[in-house]
């Protein structure tokens, strides 16, 4: 008897249906066809052992298992459950009238237990779109879908649970929607509070502006000036993700096998800090047949922090150029091409020179040529994509002794959230979310200067010798500063402050 059961395959953060066709005819042997990789072929051994452990017999017939469509590579262990259900149904050992009405996935243990697999959220989304009766997932994977969508999602711990569901038996206890919904989770990250950071008033202000407008930042300063601490503190003043952002972020983490197994969507903005020696596939994503998201996609809707930025291999820094511009990454392989979202705030940190102490009196031993060569490792096209330049000095000894603490993150976050709300309303029909994403046309439309601001900008361009791109950056930063002041127009003070965060545009700044 021919039986159809349905599984899924993720391509990026999008799932496509895979039909598991099981047929039994005269002959011997089990034959798996449909462009299955080694892991899928090995699943037959696990599936047979699990069925025998649960007292099901393997019919002495020729069993043909086809994974359709046959032109798409099938990879991973998520087909164990649909293959097992297909064999049981095709052999008539259980009456399972609803076997083809559910989308299911899961890896089987030799004892019939069902283990976690990646891609739960895209599978749930696909099941809802295609009108399936429900989606059957391993319990740990299914927890990611608490409160997501209107379709019935079942969390199972054994093959017996799956059989009870598709046989029409009582299964309400397995419904994930009957579990407690997690709407707010305490952060598991160690996020410093800006109140704990002594000094660095200019850098603190720069990071507030960056958070308010979604601007990319580079922090330059000697060792111990607090670059890493301030980058982590930035995560604490970013506005909360809305539902759309939380869904997209959660889908990326689900595909990567890093979903929220505690239950529910991921609401905390990601903060990723890979080492500067990380590999190119780890950064942008990669793999052979199954292309996994890299750090830039895991940082989607959050922060990507790269310390010791000039020390990173050139191929790493240059690989950031396209994602920073397009806010997505496309990875191509011989037989496949995958696109992942990659809209993140880049926060880079660098020493000012090879020894690290330029600007600190006689401590620096580097010549001007060495200093210029060090920072010139960062190409012009890459630096053009970084809006805000921050210079950090060692904390003043008096402030350290007197413990002069700054404004707490909670107050800064309130101003950031208010500025982001202004931008959300401004760009409601433009398809973007923050000032940093404005292209030239939108910059001209929304960066309105008052009478004094226009004359000041002309002088600024002449005095600093700004390029058109640098001028656009200053306008975007000025727009964010004006938003923080709830001002519809950009004034001289807004432009002046914005220009102070573009010191790398001065060709002689490291002389």
Image (cartoon, grey):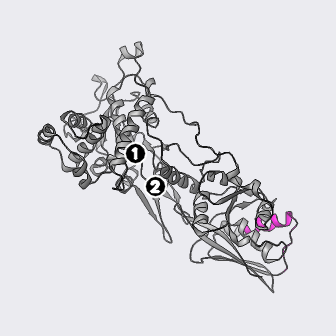
Say whether residue 4 is left or right of residue 479: right
* Residue 12 locus on image (x, y percent): 51, 62
Of labels 1 and 2, the one closer to you: 1
In the rendered image, which quarter contains the C terminus?
Answer: top left
How crowded pointer 1 is (Cα within 10 Å; few <14, some 14-19, many 20+) is rated as many
The segment highlighted magenta reads 43-60
| Residue closest to the eye, 381 or 138 | 138
Most frequent secondary structure within the magenta stretch: helix
Q: Position of residue 88 (x, y in %)?
A: 80, 72
Q: Is mark 2 on a helix, strand or loop?
A: helix
Instruction: Say whether residue 190 is visible.
Output: yes
Per the image, the residue denoted by label 2 is 284
| Residue in the picture at 67% in, 52% down | 177
Q: Is 419 covered by the magenta stretch? A: no
Q: Observer-nearest residue: 113 or 454?
A: 454
Find disc 1 in the rendering and name its residue.
Answer: 345
């Amino acid at each position: 008897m021919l039986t159809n059961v349905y599984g899924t395959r993720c391509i990026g953060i999008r799932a496509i249906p895979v039909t598991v066709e099981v047929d039994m005819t005269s002959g011997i042997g089990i034959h798996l066809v449909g462009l299955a990789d080694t892991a899928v072929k090995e699943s037959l051994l696990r599936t047979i052992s699990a069925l025998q452990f649960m007292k099901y017999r393997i019919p002495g017939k020729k069993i043909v298992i086809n994974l359709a469509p046959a032109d798409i590579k099938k990879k991973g262990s998520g087909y164990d459950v649909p293959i097992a259900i297909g064999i049981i149904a095709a052999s008539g050992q259980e009456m399972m009238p609803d076997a083809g009405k559910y989308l299911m996935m899961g890896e089987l243990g030799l004892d019939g237990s069902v283990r976690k697999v990646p891609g739960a959220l895209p599978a749930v989304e696909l099941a809802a779109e295609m009108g399936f009766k429900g989606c059957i997932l391993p319990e740990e994977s299914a927890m990611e879908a608490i409160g997501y969508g209107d379709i019935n999602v079942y969390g199972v711990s054994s093959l017996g649970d799956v059989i009870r569901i598709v046989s029409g038996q009582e299964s309400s206890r397995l419904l994930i929607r009957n579990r407690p919904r997690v709407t707010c989770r305490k952060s598991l990250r160690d996020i410093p509070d800006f109140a704990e950071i002594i000094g660095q008033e200019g850098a603190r202000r720069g990071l507030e502006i960056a958070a308010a407008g979604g601007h990319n930042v580079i922090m330059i300063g000697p060792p111990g000036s607090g670059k890493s601490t301030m980058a982590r503190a930035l995560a604490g003043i970013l506005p909360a993700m809305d539902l759309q952002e939380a869904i997209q972020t959660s889908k990326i983490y689900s595909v990567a096998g890093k979903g929220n197994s505690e239950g529910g969507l991921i609401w905390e903005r990601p903060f990723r800090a890979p080492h500067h020696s990380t590999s190119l596939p780890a950064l942008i994503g990669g793999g052979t047949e199954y292309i996994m998201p890299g750090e830039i996609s895991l940082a989607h809707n959050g922060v990507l922090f790269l310390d010791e930025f000039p020390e990173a291999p050139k191929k790493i820094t240059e690989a950031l150029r396209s994602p920073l511009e397009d806010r997505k990454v496309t990875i191509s392989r011989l037989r496949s091409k995958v696109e992942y979202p990659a809209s993140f705030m880049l926060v880079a940190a660098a020493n000012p020179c090879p020894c690290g102490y330029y600007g600190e009196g006689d401590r620096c031993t580097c010549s001007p040529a060495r200093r210029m060569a060090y920072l010139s490792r960062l190409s012009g096209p890459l630096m053009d994509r970084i809006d805000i330049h921050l210079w950090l000095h060692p904390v003043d000894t008096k402030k350290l002794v007197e413990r002069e603490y700054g404004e707490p993150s909670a107050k800064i976050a309130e101003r950031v959230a208010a500025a982001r709300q202004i931008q959300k309303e401004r760009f409601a029909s433009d398809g973007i979310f923050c000032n940093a994403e404005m292209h030239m046309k939108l910059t001209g439309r929304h960066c309105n200067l008052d009478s004094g601001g226009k004359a000041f900008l002309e002088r600024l361009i002449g005095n600093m010798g700004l390029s058109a791109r640098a001028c656009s950056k200053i306008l975007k930063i000025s727009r964010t500063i004006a938003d923080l002041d709830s001002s519809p127009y950009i004034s001289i003070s807004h432009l002046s402050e914005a220009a102070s965060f573009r010191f790398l545009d001065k060709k002689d700044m490291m002389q």
